[in-house]
């Protein structure tokens, strides 16, 4: 309290992933062989008594090996997410959101631009310095992975042209809770294909809601992980550079009485409509883009 009329209260908050991280299991009889990744997420949440009304879980695209559920619940959820190459987060209303690999290529907010940010007519303004990187340090051209069991076959996926030019760039060997060797091999190919070559990236962009409160407050408060936006850069003397990106991180900075800055971390968005096996719309040869 600052005499005579000002008080400051520091509030510390955490989302529901912190709650998940507080649960640890000593294990049980092994179960769940052949279970889909989405069903496994549901089984983990069942084990810790998570309310069914606070879940938004996709079916998933891979099947998993049997498990005893031993260990930390959040670590187990992350292992499933890694095997799926999906996404896991807690939404503002407390819902645990688990997103499958393919949902990024089918959800409306991820395949349709939700806002175009730039300095041109009809574009929403961004402020400060646009993050730009030629992501050479992020190259991954050699992936090794195996099922998470003793003596499992190690599968290797590599981009030989990238290895010749940039040297071996490997994050190490992954032990995955997948059910079959075929799925491990497909996982390795998918992860390697996304990052085997460097790209010029827009890494982050910042908006100041004061610039256009009516248009920007819905953006600052309404965007979620995986939403697609377009960002336009206009260097002097050259054509505009427009890139579409997924939002991967969200940061808010507020200073009373007026300033509210929102910064989004970005990942390049997939161009075109990706090819997805067995999908009646996106599984058509000569119509869809192969993503792995």
Image (cartoon, helix red, strand yellow):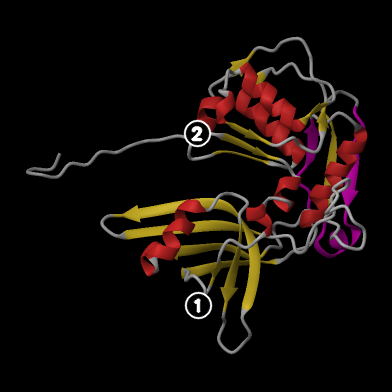
- Most extreme residue toward the bottom, as rendered? 237
Residue displayed at 36% across by 65% down? 210
- Most extreme residue toward the top, as rendered? 29
Question: Considering only vertical position in the picture, is 141 above or below 83?
Answer: below
Please tell me in which quadrant of the rendered image residue 265 appears: bottom right
Residue identifier under label 1: 119
Question: Considering only vertical position in the picture, is 92 above or below 37?
Answer: below
Is residue 276 a member of the stretch shown in magenta? Answer: no
Question: CB under 8 Å between callouts 1 and 2?
Answer: no
Residue displayed at 90% across by 58% down? 160
Mark 2 element type = loop
Please tell me in which quadrant of the rendered image residue 112 appears: bottom right
Is residue 174 a member of the stretch shown in magenta? Answer: yes
Q: Residue 74: percent from the left, percent from the top? A: 61, 28
Residue displayed at 63% across by 66% down? 133
Q: Residue 9: percent from the left, percent from the top? A: 25, 38
Which residue is nearer to you in this view: 181 or 113? 113
Residue identifier under label 2: 94
Where are the magenta residues, as a range? 152-176
Looking at the rendered structure, the number of numbered marks drawn on it comes to 2
């Amino acid at each position: 309290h600052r005499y005579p009329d000002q008080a400051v209260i520091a509030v510390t908050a955490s989302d529901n992933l912190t709650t998940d991280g507080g649960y640890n299991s000593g294990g049980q009889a092994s179960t769940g062989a052949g279970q889909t990744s989405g069903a496994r997420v549901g089984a983990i949440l069942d084990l810790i008594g998570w309310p069914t009304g606070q879940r938004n879980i996709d079916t998933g695209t891979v099947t998993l090996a049997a498990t005893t559920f031993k260990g930390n619940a959040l670590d187990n959820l992350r292992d499933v997410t890694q095997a799926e190459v999906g996404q896991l987060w807690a939404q503002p209303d407390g819902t645990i959101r688990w997103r499958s690999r393919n949902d990024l290529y089918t959800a409306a907010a991820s395949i349709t631009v939700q806002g175009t940010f730039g300095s041109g007519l009809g574009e929403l303004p961004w402020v400060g310095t646009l993050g730009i990187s030629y992501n050479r340090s992020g190259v991954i051209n050699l992936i090794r992975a195996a099922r998470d069991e003793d003596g499992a076959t190690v599968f290797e996926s590599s981009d030989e042209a990238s290895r010749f030019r940039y040297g071996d760039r490997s994050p190490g060997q992954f032990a995955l809770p997948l059910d079959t060797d075929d799925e491990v091999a497909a996982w390795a190919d998918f992860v390697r294909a996304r990052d085997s070559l460097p790209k010029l990236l827009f890494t982050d962009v910042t908006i100041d809601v004061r610039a256009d409160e009516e248009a920007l407050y819905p953006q600052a408060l309404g965007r979620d992980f995986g939403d697609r936006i377009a960002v336009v850069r206009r260097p002097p003397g050259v054509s505009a550079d427009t890139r579409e990106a997924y939002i991967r991180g969200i940061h808010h900075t507020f200073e009373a009485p007026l300033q509210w800055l929102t910064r989004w971390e970005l990942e390049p968005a997939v161009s075109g409509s990706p090819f997805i096996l067995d999908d009646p719309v996106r599984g058509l040869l000569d119509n869809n883009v192969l993503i792995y």
